[in-house]
Amino acid sequence: MPKEPREVVIVGGGVAGIFVLRNLFADKDKVPGGLHITLIKREKSGWISTCGLPFALRGWYELERTEIQKPGFYLEQGIDFRSESEVTKLNLDAKSVELKAGENLNYDYLVIATGRKQSVKETTLDGVFTFNDENDACKIEEALKTRNVQHAFVRGRGIIGLQSAVAFAERGIKTTILGGPPSLLPSSLDPDIGDIIKERLEKDGMRFILDRREITAIKGKADWVKSVVIGETAADKEEIPAEIVIIGKWMLPETDLAKAAGIAIGETGGIVTDRAMHVKRGRRSLTEVYALGDCVEVVDGITHRPKLNQMASTAVVQARVIGDNILSDILSQPRLYSTCEYCLSPTVADIGCGLLIGSVGLTTDAATRAGLKTISGKATKLVKARYFPGATSMTMKLIFDAFTLRLLGAQMVGEVCVAERVNEFEVAIRAGLTAAELRNMERSFDPSVAQLEDVTVDAAKKALESA
Amino acid sequence: MPKEPREVVIVGGGVAGIFVLRNLFADKDKVPGGLHITLIKREKSGWISTCGLPFALRGWYELERTEIQKPGFYLEQGIDFRSESEVTKLNLDAKSVELKAGENLNYDYLVIATGRKQSVKETTLDGVFTFNDENDACKIEEALKTRNVQHAFVRGRGIIGLQSAVAFAERGIKTTILGGPPSLLPSSLDPDIGDIIKERLEKDGMRFILDRREITAIKGKADWVKSVVIGETAADKEEIPAEIVIIGKWMLPETDLAKAAGIAIGETGGIVTDRAMHVKRGRRSLTEVYALGDCVEVVDGITHRPKLNQMASTAVVQARVIGDNILSDILSQPRLYSTCEYCLSPTVADIGCGLLIGSVGLTTDAATRAGLKTISGKATKLVKARYFPGATSMTMKLIFDAFTLRLLGAQMVGEVCVAERVNEFEVAIRAGLTAAELRNMERSFDPSVAQLEDVTVDAAKKALESA
């Protein structure tokens, strides 16, 4: 008698859900009886490159290009890809999920990839948007095309806020960013590094308001936004013209379904998983229920405390681990089993003006909050000799534990190869490299692509001198 | 009574000697009584960027540009910079060196940076050159400018041979490279990776002869070379036209002075040092005599066997360590003392056609010779999504220990950020990262500069599948 196919139900079709689907699909022929994969997502789209949306707004390509695969692509391959569909309940004991449309789907393996949600309530005024997904991007693009937008206002000084502000500024729109003190991208960059970007973007006409004021009113004219009021007291108050407003504040994990099913939620508000990405109910890991992506919390690689990372790069690794473990379980092959490492939050982002920022590990502030005493060194240098093409400048800051001198974090601003350097420092943090080791490590050299003494060496030297 | 300045004598003015000088000079004000630094070099020049010479031949800039500092620059700062000068004897017991000009210089610290020498005897025929230093480069440049050079012949398939061949080919000269089997750059690249470059350069008209044949005759016309004969038997023999010939064979450490002074020479022919770069006489380290650069042997980071590395990147780290240790000794401050790590030979080289090769750790062949069984994975992928500018391709090969699955070596061919990736893998080898860890490591992501699943992940996956 032929075996029945195994049922996998994936709830959510962002990068997290899509990558679990991709990994399982690639391995489906290894499963006797086959795999039947169902993916349920609210949106109409297939696989969207969410991280690609800001570049579409910046005009690098059409918005449609961010839909890497349409639902039809998956349907043709026999995947039960259900867009514009919603799960209303997880029945963990019965191993089934209930759909809004009334249907009940049984599963052998359940994957929760419900993503995140905006932490602010929306306004009814047109022209005020969040920027979380492709629907938001479409609305923003539409507004820019049909309205005479001359002023933009962005609430949020994180990557989403900054990248949408850059898109507006590059289109010649006078743009204001409101965020808390003291500086930009505070979860990735120390103030001295964040200020480098701020000053550069100010030169291009962007305005930053980084203080404690909040939006106190959004004013409109004929249902469309025309200005934002910040501050409460007469002295504080300011009215800033804006024909478009983006609310890019911190996102919360979307955990309503998980919570209702009794799945453990951590102190950060994200779903708790073990290293294999199984969820927990009470103290027990559920070996057939996984969660990943923006809805889960991860464990920081230095402080060993839970945190929200909410980056596509994290989700992709978690998806790999989940693919491994479902296959390992079905085939009873423990050698396929795999686990996630602690998270060091390697980050790179294009923030306009040809600049990339990079960050990994702890900022000085995060280290201090974790009770670690730090020293640091900062240097700016060309990435290769001046007379070679592409000799651009890079600023690097390295943060070390003051006692062991081990690397805790690295931050940089440059024009090229920032992602690769971030990855190097991620390995260096994992390896426990010290300032002296980083300073004395041999680095590959060819004058057309590197300096004999890299900016890393200079930064490590300065840190040692301050020790 | 004011203290006498300490005397440091540096023998040799290549990158190795120059960097010791630079490091000591930067620290000279920390020394009570001061430092008196003497550098003695045979050549006329100051600080030459030897690694920059091939790019000058390729026409990226004038040859003069490779002289980063002239001797006058150092003389003006009070350094006794003696170009066109030669040391004939090291008197280690008397702590002095004898100069050819007859003078005797006393030292408190001696630094031997005598470099390397060509392993082949020269021909008397004009048009046959080695390519080791700026004098060679000048002669080659002169020949190219004044002679009607239509054919070039290069003996040597290492980086020097290849980079000079690229310079000729880029000038429209029909170029032949002769080297041993089986492939290019064998100390850095496995044959399958070396062949990628070979095929690419062949498309541009370069010819490679990679077999056991040797040069059996060099023929001339009116004292200038006109052809090279390779092979011995009638079946083997071939006469190849060449109006310029480069003999770019392996260089030997220049150790005559050290040997004559009784300093220990290792099995590779290089000077033996301890981790602090002190030389040895018998079993004893001489704490006031240092050696570095192409004349010393280093210890391989994986096999723990001595080898010759002869790269500027190695010399620069050694120079840093020597600077630290001389200062530590003078000031009696042990905390300044530093040591060199094992050498993992991180390498990057521009080899024309916009291609960079990168390598670190052991090749498959080197691992096999060291008794290690390996597995490997290879992948080719765009470095970012196709619709982003600069989405070029990268081929990567990762070599792992077959038992522990720890990374032993990495090789790559690509157009961008190769140096930075080599450095990442160097840290990964040091850290003992396994194939599974590399596959599951989070990597920084932004679609404008990276893929969600990097070529590294693909290569590690393939290696695991072969395990």
Image (cartoon, coloured by chain):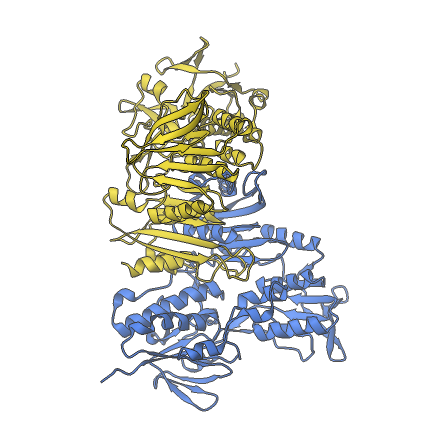
Chain colours: A yellow, B blue
In this orientation, which residue lies closer to the viewer: A252 or B192?
A252
Residue B90: x and y in percent read: 41, 83
Count every numbered label the image shows and give the total: 0
In this orientation, which residue lies closer to the viewer: A258 or A357?
A357
Instruction: State the residue at coordinates (44%, 25%).
Output: A225
Task: In the rendered view, tell whether residue A407 sits above or below residue A254.
Answer: below
Residue farthest along the front direction in this orientation: A234
Q: Quadrant of residue B237?
A: bottom right
Residue farthest along the bottom direction in this orientation: B102
* Image position of A355 (left or right of B91): right
Residue A41: x and y in percent read: 47, 20
Residue farthest along the top direction in this orientation: A102
Instruction: State the residue at coordinates (52%, 42%).
Output: B455
In this orientation, which residue lies closer to the viewer: A262 or A154?
A154
Task: In the rendered view, tell whether residue A130 sits above or below residue B116.
Answer: above
* Image position of A315 (left or right of A233): right
Instruction: State the residue at coordinates (56%, 46%).
Output: B394
Residue A348: x and y in percent read: 44, 42
Q: Quadrant of residue B321?
A: bottom left
Quarter the C terminus of chain A occupies = bottom left
In this rendering, does residue B404 appear at all?
no
Q: Quadrant of residue B104?
A: bottom left
* Image position of A277 (left or right of B356): left
In this rendering, does residue A120 appear at all?
yes
In this orientation, which residue lies closer to the viewer: B286 or A227?
A227
Task: In the rendered view, tell whether residue B266 sits above or below residue A361.
Answer: below
Task: In the rendered view, tell whether residue B461 sits above or below residue B307.
Answer: above
Residue A153: x and y in percent read: 42, 33
